[in-house]
Image (cartoon, grey):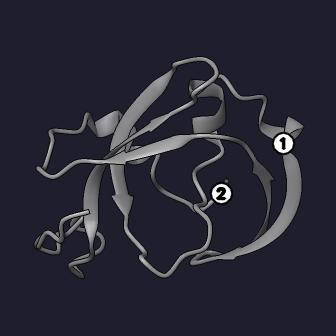
């Protein structure tokens, strides 16, 4: 995979610290449902935690996944494992504001 440089971006005026936000598509391979949003990229992470609201949008039954305690930037929570694919885009995309709001919080 080629190495690319991306500028750090400010996600909002409420958080003025530039971070490695990139445009992503998250897809449930079983239903084909997907959503576009921005993702905070952590190259050292073993797993991804997504907002709980994404489960329904992708066609997952949130609590039917395998339960696991996880620690996120917002503290500890119960996560439920589900299968998704995440595509990272090489260019910034216009993300609808309603999708950005769903990115607040660190629930699975």
List the residue tagged with mark 2.
Answer: 107
Residue 34: where, in percent of width, then height? 46, 27
Residue 71 lies left or right of residue 65; in this view the side is left
Mark 1 neighbour density, 10 Å: few (under 14) some (14–19) many (20 or more): few
The residue at the point 38 percent across, 66 percent down is: 40
Q: Is disc 2 surrounded by few (<14), some (14 to 19) or many (20+) residues within 10 Å?
A: many
Q: Is residue 6 above or below residue 35?
A: below
The residue at 78%/67% (across/down) is 77
Instruction: Residue 8: name its quadrant.
Output: bottom left
Q: Is residue 34 above or below residue 105?
A: above
Q: Earlier in the sequence, mark 2 or mark 1?
A: 1
Quarter placement of the N terminus: bottom left
Query: Most extreme residue toward the front, as rendered?
Result: 1
Residue 3 in which image quadrant: bottom left
Q: Nearer the viewer, residue 30 or 73?
A: 30
Q: Are marks 2 and 1 in contact (CB under 8 Å)?
A: no
User: Residue 48, how many percent across, how many down?
Assistant: 58, 61
Image height check: is 31 above or below 12?
A: above
Q: Which mark is residue 65?
A: 1
Q: Quadrant of residue 64?
A: top right
Q: Is 43 on the left or on the right of 72, as rendered?
A: left
Residue at the spot x=11%, y=50% of the render?
Answer: 91
Report the number of numbered marks.
Answer: 2
Q: Secondary structure at mark 1?
A: loop
Where residue 99 sits: x, y (%)? 37, 38
Residue 102: where, in percent of width, then height? 47, 44
Nearer mark to the viewer, of 2 and 1: 1
| Residue at the image position 24 percent from the left and 82 percent from the top | 17
Placement of 56 over or under 101, stated as above or below: above
Give left or right: position of 35 versus 49: left
- SS class, disc 2: loop
């Amino acid at each position: 995979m080629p190495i690319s440089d991306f500028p750090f971006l400010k996600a909002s005026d409420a958080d003025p610290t530039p971070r490695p936000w990139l445009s992503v598509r998250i897809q449930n391979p079983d239903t084909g449902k997907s959503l576009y949003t921005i993702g905070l990229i952590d190259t050292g992470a073993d797993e991804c935690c997504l907002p709980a609201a994404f489960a329904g949008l992708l066609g997952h039954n949130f609590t039917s996944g395998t339960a696991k305690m996880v620690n996120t930037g917002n503290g500890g929570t119960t996560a439920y494992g589900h299968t998704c694919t995440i595509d990272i885009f090489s260019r910034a995309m216009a993300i609808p504001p309603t999708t950005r709001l769903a990115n607040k919080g660190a629930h699975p």
